[in-house]
Image (tube, rainbow, N blue to C red):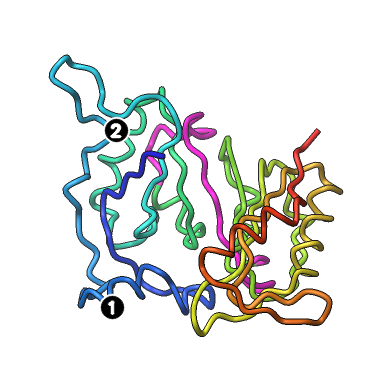
Amino acid sequence: MPMWNPWRGCKRVSEGCKYCYIHKGDYKKGINTENIIKTDDFYKPIEKLKNGSYKIKKGIVYVCFSSDFFIEEADEWRKECWKMIKERSDLTFLFLTKRITRFYDCIPEDWNEGYDNVVICTTVENQKNADERLSFFSKLPIRHKCITAQPLLENINIEKYLDDIEIVVVGGESDYNARPLNYDWVLNIRKQCINKNVEFEFRQAGTYFIEDDKMTKLSVRELMKVAREKNINYKSK
């Protein structure tokens, strides 16, 4: 799974960021996460081997998983990233963002209806942010859209925003102080996806997982295992 983090560092923007793994990991290392800096991997997509072939072969590249591709502090670097993304049309670049409302400030001049090798995933955690972000997201010229409701903090209704969405991913929060994930909320989103024939994936349970009014504390290694065992993923038809 190729990862490309052209810059690192982020700033909390909403409720879902409270126990962000990036901030938590940096705190343990004595790093100030709010310092947004370019990394040594900035040119990773176009790096080549001695024989002239690209180091990264065909496949999905996960972008900015230690930041946000649309973060304001990276505005001066993003244009060069788009050039690399366009050059590597054989790769699919996927990134998550909580800053989707900055879309028009962040896309390249030749975006038009979108690059076919870019997947943009908007993250939501509660109804307020779902309504704010997805009402905007639904109108944007993007060829490949997905939604991540992770960490899911409450029961939400997103069915009216699911047109043109390729997949919805749901998951709980992982932290000692994590807010609980109610399995009923997961099933509700799954039902909405089935109604709109949109692919659905239950990615991971939360550290505190509620099912049938009973809360269980799970270890990190159990989070994805519990989600898989539920076997509720849905493939669109």
Residue appearing at x 36%, y 52% in the figure: 64
Q: Which residues are magenta?
A: 107-131
Kindly identify the amino acid type of the residue bearing the numbered disc 2: Met
Residue 227, above or below 233: below
Magenta stretch containing residue 108, yes or no? yes
Residue that mark 2 sits on: 84
Magenta stretch containing residue 158, yes or no? no
Q: Earlier in the sequence, mark 1 or mark 2?
A: 1
Label 1, label 2: how far apart the Cα atoms are: 32 Å
Q: Tell me the element at label 2.
A: helix
| Residue 183 spot, x, y in % from top left | 76, 69
Residue appearing at x 73%, y 54% in the figure: 161
Residue 117, above or below 214: above
Q: Nearer the viewer, residue 160 or 155?
A: 155
Kindly identify the amino acid type of the residue bearing the numbered disc 1: Tyr
Name the mark on residue 27. 1
Q: Nearer the viewer, residue 8 or 128?
A: 8
Q: Nearer the viewer, mark 1 or mark 2?
A: 1
Label 2: how many Cα within 10 Å (few below 14, some 14–19, many 20+) = some
